[in-house]
Amino acid sequence: MQFARKDVLDMESLSVAEIQAVLDTAETLKEISTRPIKKVPTLRGKTVIHFFYEPSTRTRTSFEIAAKRLSADTVSISASTSSISKGETLADTAKNLEAMNPDAIVIRHSAAGAPHLLARLVNASVINAGDGMHAHPTQALLDMMTVREKKGHIDGLRLAIIGDIAHSRVARSNIIGFVKMGAEVVLAGPPTMIPMGIETLGALVSYDVVEVIKDADVVMVLRIQKERLQAFAYSSEREYAQCYGLTEDKLAEAKKDLLIMHPGPINRGLEIAPEVAEGPYSVILEQVANGVAIRMALLYLLLGGPR
Ligand code: CP
């Protein structure tokens, strides 16, 4: 299957065939990370700029590792150490980066749509590493890879996404991606954290976490996005942890082969109990490992052949 696109900006625009191509390629490339010499020459001579306006540990590190394992040259820019801190606009920054002729720009930005704007301004491939509360497509792809690896398929599975749906770009990208791949997606959390009309993305909504967990093949717990909240949208953190946090007692009737996921970073003891995050159902660190493979696959598919 030819991956003929210039950019990867969201899950809406990726077809089922393209998603499958990314997952298949990532599965093949994953083995490179287990070798004593973790490097192949595939993207030698290509330049990838990592342009992060917002903090990141997993996404930024795994993109850098992915590019380096494919032998691309990498440059990192953050908002605080670039001329953005002097007031330069995204459009001007884009034009200046373009003048240096990079092959790809990976961008994380607090404004929804920033990667889409950048993609219109530059010839380089643009990959969205998370934009505001809008989209985080590479997180959804690595989540899909983890589920497919563990379950053998995605279609027909029931995915429960629990927590702060309203502020979550991870939720939005995963709903669109998993529904597209034939899974049933159920959202659960307090009404203040589930936006009205979210069902239009193809997900069901429930407010009964224990009931949702009972029928789920995969439970994805979301971080409470304190940095995006004006005020905590529940009576107290303690009460949230009791009612909606994933604790061992809420797993009493869960399926024996349940997968528990979390995109990270974790608020331990709030949305997930430490013993669940590190318990037998958890695949959280496998998600992180697959992040490198997915980002290698995207860079390879976008830059590795004639566009
Ligand atoms: N999952 C995720 O995006 O983590 P980071 O914010 O650490 O990149």
Image (cartoon, helix red, strand yellow):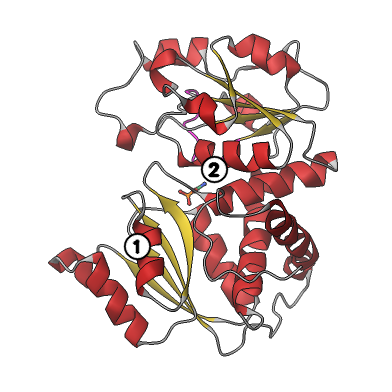
Would you place residue 211 above or below residue 287 in this image?
A: above
Look at the magenta stretch and give its main secondary structure. Answer: loop
Q: Examine the rendering and report whether any part of residue 280 can be seen.
A: no
Magenta span of residues? 262-270
Q: Is residue 256 magenta?
A: no
Q: Amino acid at mark 1?
A: Leu
Q: Residue at x 77, y 67 (%)?
A: 1
Q: Are marks 2 and 1 in contact (CB under 8 Å)?
A: no
Give above or below for 279 relative to 293.
Answer: above
Tell me residue 144's x, y (percent).
69, 45
Residue position marked by numbered label 2 in the rendering: 173
Q: Is residue 11 above or below residue 117?
A: above
Q: In the rendering, at what x and y percent does residue 212 appear?
A: 66, 15
SS at mark 2 in the image: helix
Closer to the chain start, of discs 2 and 1, is 1
**Mark 1 nearby-residue class (10 Å; few <14, some 14–19, many ≥20):** some
Q: CA distance from mark 2 to mark 1?
A: 19 Å
Q: Amino acid at mark 2?
A: Ser
Where residue 117 is drawn, which disc sits there?
Answer: 1
